[in-house]
Image (cartoon, rainbow, N blue to C red):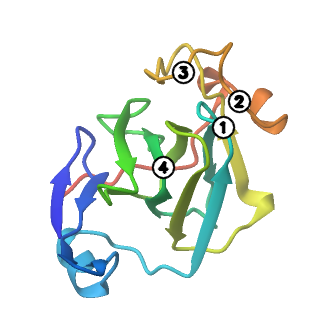
């Protein structure tokens, strides 16, 4: 597994190794030993999967607040996405900044999004399937979201607001300027 740091410490891009032969390929998508060595400090408890029918579908900037915050390990099973993580940790040098990576089924890339980040993505192809692991269970009472097209965040999405496909819920989300972060940044020692 090749691990690359992104422009925000803690968010990691992982590139697994594929073994090809006449039948197809084999790839190890997760191993607790290499995850720990790479700095993925998460014990995953739930796997989720989502299908988006249309290219340009945006799944907004979702997260769970403490005590049920979640880290995520995201990869694509079919198609491709523009995957985004936004730092919500008060006191972080990267607070309010975002990082993004293109993840594809063909390339097998994965993005590790630690606790204290909002996460969202935009599909790059029709019928895109995304899977991700989380390190705490879904807790609707702790669920929050930020507007995907927030002007303060100024995320460089690969789709215009007019062409984006959104859920009704994702059309009415809070602005970053109104968000009071319950997350705190712990500087490395």
Query: Looking at the image, is mark 3 or mark 4 earlier in the sequence?
Result: 4
Q: Residue furthest right?
A: 168
Element assignment for label 1:
loop
Q: Residue 165 carries which label?
A: 2
The reply to whether residue 9 is in sight is yes
Residues at discs 1 and 2 in contact (Cβ within 8 Å): yes
Does residue 149 appear left or right of residue 75 in this picture?
right
Element assignment for label 4:
loop
Q: Residue furthest front?
A: 22
Does residue 139 appear left or right of residue 168 in this picture?
left
Disc nearest the viewer among 1 and 3: 1
Element assignment for label 3:
loop
Crowd class of label 2 (few under 14; some 14 to 19; many from 20; radius 10 Å)? many
| Residue 105 quadrant | bottom left
Q: Residue at x 34, y 78 (%)?
A: 30
Mark 3 to mark 2 CA distance (whole Å): 9 Å
- Point out the image quarter for the C terminus: bottom left
Q: Residue 79 carries which label?
A: 4
In the rendered view, tell whether residue 182 sits above or below residue 36.
above
Mark 4 to mark 2 CA distance (whole Å): 16 Å
Q: Mark 3 points at which residue?
A: 159
Does residue 18 appear left or right of residue 87 in this picture?
left
In the rendered view, tell whether residue 48 sits above or below residue 76.
below
- Point out the image quarter for the N terminus: bottom left
Closest to the observer, 7 or 69: 7
Q: Name the residue under label 1.
A: 54
Mark 1 to mark 2 CA distance (whole Å): 7 Å
Q: Residue at x 19, y 50 (%)?
A: 5
| Residue 75 quadrant | bottom left
The reply to whether residue 67 is in sight is no
Query: Looking at the image, is mark 1 or mark 3 earlier in the sequence?
Result: 1
């Amino acid at each position: 597994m090749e691990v690359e740091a992104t422009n925000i410490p803690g968010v990691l891009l992982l590139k697994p190794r594929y073994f090809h032969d006449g039948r197809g390929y084999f790839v190890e998508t997760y191993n607790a030993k290499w995850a720990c060595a790479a700095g993925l400090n998460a014990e995953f408890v739930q796997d989720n999967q989502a299908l988006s029918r249309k290219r340009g579908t945006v799944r907004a900037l979702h997260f769970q607040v403490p005590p049920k915050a979640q880290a995520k390990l995201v990869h694509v099973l079919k198609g491709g996405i523009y995957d985004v993580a936004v730092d919500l940790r008060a006191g972080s040098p990267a607070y309010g900044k975002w990082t993004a990576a293109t993840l594809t089924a063909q390339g097998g890339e994965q993005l590790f999004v630690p606790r204290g980040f909002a996460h969202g993505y935009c599909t790059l192809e029709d019928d895109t399937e995304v899977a991700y692991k989380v390190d705490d269970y879904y807790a609707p009472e702790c669920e929050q979201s930020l507007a995907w097209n927030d002007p303060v965040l100024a995320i460089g999405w690969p789709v215009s607001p007019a062409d984006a496909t959104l859920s009704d819920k994702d059309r009415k989300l809070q602005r970053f300027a109104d968000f009071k972060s319950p997350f705190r940044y712990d500087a490395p020692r």
